[in-house]
Image: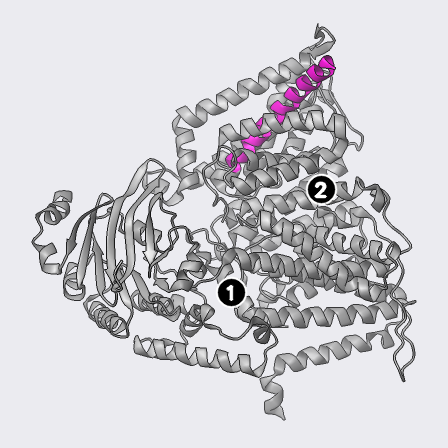
């Protein structure tokens, strides 16, 4: 019993870190660019597959593949912003336009992936072999590495966001782009940068997932609902909230999936719905007007 | 006579259009094409509800889910409760409206991203929800849904629903009623309040408009209509499967119809979009995957180059995206119809 | 609260996070007076207006309108009770015509039940026609009659501001809150606005006005409340305020 819980907790933590990274990236994009970036899940998938492809077919070492995966995803994100969102970011129908564009992008990426990648789930061999056992709980070294890399990246992200000028600039643009412009911050550059960082994070999450779990072309669609709920729970403008939300939801989904099956998502939705009803900014967020 | 026509030009055009549609089955004999027309009507009506919510600043990604609630409600009412379709039709609308009232009360508190997220999740979880209810046959769907009972009117031959043509006329009648009801609401005090909310919520509030209540009203009314269409659809198809009511692709397609036609034209926009995209695959054959890529690309290209849809080409000056001219940085405001008068257009 | 008091602000405090925008402010507004609310930038004047009209919930304190506690009421309810307001920026339906803009102000004025309106019964049509006429009367009285079919975004700034006041008037207020109605206007427009405001008061509506233009304030207002850094530092007749040392310091001290 305890060991099942322990195992579930460890798995939940592993998946939780993935969610933390995804939620963090999405929160950045949502709060700074105010684009309802529903295509985000597909970038997660792209990162996983680019890493998989370079590792498996090009036979490159894993860490190189991971870097390539992250860079490719960020590049894709930048290009998407350049050709699509940059044009509609300032229009008076931007609310509907950005949602629609993100939706279209999500469809395109998803379907193209379906066409060019194999339909069966894939994986790549991990470079972290072995496992630690404590009692009946197995701590796979690869999963420990995943957790480690996840925590590392999250810490770096927080450092950049809270302690460095770039983070302050992002916050300024997120709260009041006109005022930020007066302070000499180029909002447009920040939008590009935020997209790059956000999608890079998604790609990173996919890349570190690939050795430990199977990847499929629908993995993006499968997680996007949960990530959106996570960002709402934590607060759409709070990085800390994304982390908290990611861990909490990751653990709930891990335990819930085991004991209840897919229906756990519905319970999660209802619970978060109730929380949001009483606390519209989410647990740690401040603004309720994002996107409006 | 000409004066009379000009003054009520829209009404007359509408009547003529309805008459033309009623005459179509005399010339089009193939049941397949008739069924395509029925599908076009169903899609157009659902897409119209998307626009009705859009008017008030709500972007709902779960129209298909409420359509599904109506369909499943109707299936249960006609099969398990042995009710006549004619009773189940309005009841399904009411049941769907009840769901919408409860859900809407919770999620409309914060329109904007929170609302879109919640409707996205609802849209994605609907299939899972149905799939977990064994009383609704889980993921297998419900079949053998009875067709509407024969209508026996005095002096006229009985109307039997055993052919596509019969369903076509039923769809047409329902569609006409839906159009009339929606336009009546648009032109009324309610529609005006919705316009105000969509154009400038802050100003609307200062005019005494209860933004929450009117948004909730639009959510409930549109869901009732979607449920009504769902009930029709269930009896028309005879079977329903949960994946038909998924966010992807159904809800997204409904959005595409509206945007392709033009979101400022509450009735014509969705109708044109639905007609074009429902019939398009008939003339160009392609695989499922390619067609979805094309839909995605269409969404992106439309929103960049022709954000107000095809019908905006009637006013070429304002049709094309502002950024194509020397653009200025504009404030992000709640967008929707910039010309709410268009809501009057049929 | 005397029968002459139409609005009582009672110890209202408003915090925005760590910022204290209003600090225990209290004053009354008397029926049919024109009250001026002045103070240096950032004094909390717009916040005060926002609290009274319900856009910002007060952190503490109460607001009474005609003996009724409106502190926790949502804005649309407060408007319904008879308080109207305009906005600093041109908050208007820019893509609509002037008369259409005004017509939206009559949302609360419909008397017939809603179903009659939806069914487009003749009685509903008549009611809307009456409201339209009322709208044209307001526009004529305020000098916008000639532009009633113009699209609002094409109007010069001064006209837009007047339209904003017109729309607030359409809501049939007993108390009208004006937020800097003369900002951005030239001398002629200001004179017009002065006349219009007097006309509004003469028709029985109480007015509370935030304004920076001191000449206008002194000539127009019966009484003045002065805010500085969220606190009320003076209240009284215009000539008292003009010679009040604290007030002078608050303004000059800023420079």
Q: Is residue B324 above or below residue A144?
A: below
Q: Residue B114 colored magenta?
A: no
The image shows residue B2 at horizontal and vertical percentages of 62, 91
Q: Are marks 2 and 1 on the same chain?
A: yes
Residue at 53% in and 41% down: A278
- The local crowd at label 2, few if under 14, some if 14 to 19, many if 20 or more residues have their Cα within 10 Å, is many
The image shows residue C65 at horizontal and vertical percentages of 33, 59
Mark 2 residue element: helix
Which SS does the magenta portion mostly show?
A: helix
Instruction: Quarter of the image for the C terminus of chain B: give it.
Output: bottom right
Q: Is residue A227 above or below residue B346?
A: above
Q: How many marks?
A: 2
Q: Which residue is mark 1?
A: B193
The image shows residue C126 at horizontal and vertical percentages of 51, 82
Q: Which residue is mark 2?
A: B125
Instruction: Quarter of the image for the N terminus of chain B: give it.
Output: bottom right
Q: CA distance from mark 2 to mark 1?
A: 32 Å
Residue at 51% in and 59% down: B198
Residue at 62% in and 66% down: B266
Residue B336 visible (yes or no): yes
Q: What's the magenta region? A: A1-29
- The colour style of the image is one colour
> On what subunit does the disc labeled 1 rest?
B
Q: Residue A25 colored magenta?
A: yes
The image shows residue B191 at horizontal and vertical percentages of 55, 67
Residue B307 visible (yes or no): no
Determine which quarter of the picture holds residue B221: bottom right
């Amino acid at each position: 019993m305890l060991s099942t819980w322990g195992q579930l907790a460890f798995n939940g933590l592993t998946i939780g870190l993935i969610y933390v990274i995804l939620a963090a990236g999405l929160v950045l994009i949502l709060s700074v660019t105010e684009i309802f970036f529903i295509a985000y899940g597909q970038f997660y998938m792209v990162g996983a597959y680019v890493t998989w492809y370079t590792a498996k077919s090009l036979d490159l070492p894993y860490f190189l593949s991971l870097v390539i995966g992250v860079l490719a995803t960020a590049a894709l994100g930048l290009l998407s912003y350049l050709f699509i969102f940059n044009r509609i970011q300032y229009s008076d129908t931007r609310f509907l336009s950005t949602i629609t564009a993100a939706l279209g992008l999500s469809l395109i990426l998803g379907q193209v992936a379906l066409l060019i990648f194999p339909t069966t789930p894939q994986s790549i061999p991990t470079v972290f072999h072995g496992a630690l056992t404590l009692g009946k709980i197995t701590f796979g070294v690869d999963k420990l590495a995943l957790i480690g890399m996840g925590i590392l990246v999250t810490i770096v992200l927080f450092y950049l966001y809270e302690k460095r000028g770039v983070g302050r600039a992002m916050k300024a643009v997120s709260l009041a782009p006109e005022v930020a412009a007066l302070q000499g911050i180029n909002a447009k550059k920040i939008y590009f940068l935020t997209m790059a960082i956000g999608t890079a994070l998604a790609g990173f999450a996919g890349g570190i997932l690939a050795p430990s779990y199977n990847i499929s072309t629908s993995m993006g669609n499968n997680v996007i609902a949960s990530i959106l709920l996570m960002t709402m729970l934590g607060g759409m403008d709070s990085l800390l909230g994304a982390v908290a939300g990611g861990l909490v939801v990751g653990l709930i989904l891990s335990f819930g999936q085991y004991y209840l099956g897919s229906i756990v998502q519905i319970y999660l939705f209802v619970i978060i719905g109730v929380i949001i009803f009483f606390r519209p900014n989410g647990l740690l967020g401040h603004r309720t007007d994002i996107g409006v | 006579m000409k004066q009379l026509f000009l003054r009520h030009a829209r009404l007359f055009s509408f009547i003529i259009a309805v008459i033309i549609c009623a005459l179509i089955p005399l010339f089009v004999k193939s049941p397949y094409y008739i069924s395509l027309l029925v599908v076009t009507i169903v899609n157009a009506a659902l897409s119209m509800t998307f626009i009705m919510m859009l008017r008030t600043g709500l972007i709902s990604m779960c129209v298909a889910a409420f359509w599904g609630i109506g369909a499943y409600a109707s299936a249960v009412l006609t099969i398990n409760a042995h009710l006549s379709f004619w009773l189940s039709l309005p009841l399904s609308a009411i049941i769907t409206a009840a769901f919408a009232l409860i859900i809407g009360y919770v999620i409309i508190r914060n329109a904007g991203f929170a609302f879109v997220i919640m409707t996205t999740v609802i849209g994605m979880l609907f299939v899972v929800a149905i799939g977990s209810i064994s009383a609704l046959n889980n993921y297998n769907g419900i079949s053998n849904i009875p067709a509407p009972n024969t209508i026996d009117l005095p002096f006229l031959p009985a109307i039997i629903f055993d052919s596509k043509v019969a369903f076509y006329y039923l769809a047409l009648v329902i569609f006409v009623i839906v159009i009339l009801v929606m336009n009546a609401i648009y032109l009324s005090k309610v529609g005006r309040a919705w316009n105000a909310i969509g154009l400038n919520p802050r100003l609307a509030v200062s005019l005494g408009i209860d933004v929450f209540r009117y948004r909730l009203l639009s959510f409930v009314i549109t869901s009732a209509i979607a449920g009504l269409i769902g009930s029709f659809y269930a009896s028309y198809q005879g079977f329903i499967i949960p994946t038909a009511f998924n966010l992807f692709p159904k809800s997204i397609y409904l959005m595409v119809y509206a945007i392709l036609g033009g979101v400022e034209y509450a009735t014509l926009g969705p109708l044109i979009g639905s007609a074009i995209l429902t019939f398009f695959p008939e003339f160009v054959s392609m695989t499922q995957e390619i067609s979805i890529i094309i839909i995605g690309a269409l969404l992106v290209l439309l929103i960049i180059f022709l954000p107000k849809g095809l019908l905006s080409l009637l006013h070429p000056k304002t049709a094309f995206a502002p950024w194509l001219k020397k653009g200025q940085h504009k404030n992000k405001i709640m967008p929707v119809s910039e010309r709410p008068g268009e809501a009057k257009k049929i | 609260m005397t029968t002459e008091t139409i609005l009582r602000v009672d110890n209202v405090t408003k915090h925005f996070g760590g910022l204290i925008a209003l600090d225990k402010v209290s004053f009354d507004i008397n029926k049919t007076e024109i009250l001026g609310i002045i103070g240096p930038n950032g004094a909390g004047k717009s916040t005060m207006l926002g609290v009274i009209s319900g856009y910002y919930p007060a952190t503490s304190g109460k607001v009474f309108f005609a003996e009724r506690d409106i502190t926790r009421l949502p804005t649309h309810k407060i408007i319904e009770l008879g308080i109207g307001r305009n906005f600093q920026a041109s908050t208007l339906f820019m893509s609509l015509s002037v008369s259409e803009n005004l017509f939206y102000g009559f949302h609360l004025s419909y008397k017939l039940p809603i179903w009659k309106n939806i069914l487009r019964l003749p009685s509903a049509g008549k009611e809307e026609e009456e409201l339209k006429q009322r709208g044209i009367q307001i526009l004529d009285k305020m000098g916008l009659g000639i532009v009633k079919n113009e699209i609002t975004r094409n109007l010069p700034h001064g006209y837009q501001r007047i339209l904003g006041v017109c729309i607030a008037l359409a809501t049939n207020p007993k108390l009208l809150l004006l937020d800097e109605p003369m900002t951005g206007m030239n001398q002629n427009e200001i004179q017009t606005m002065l006349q219009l405001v007097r006309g509004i008061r003469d028709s029985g509506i109480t007015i509370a006005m935030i304004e920076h233009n001191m000449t206008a304030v002194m000539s127009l207002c019966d009484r003045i409340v002065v805010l500085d850094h969220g606190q009320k530092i003076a209240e009284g007749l215009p000539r008292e305020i003009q010679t009040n040392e604290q007030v002078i310091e608050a303004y000059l001290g800023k420079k």
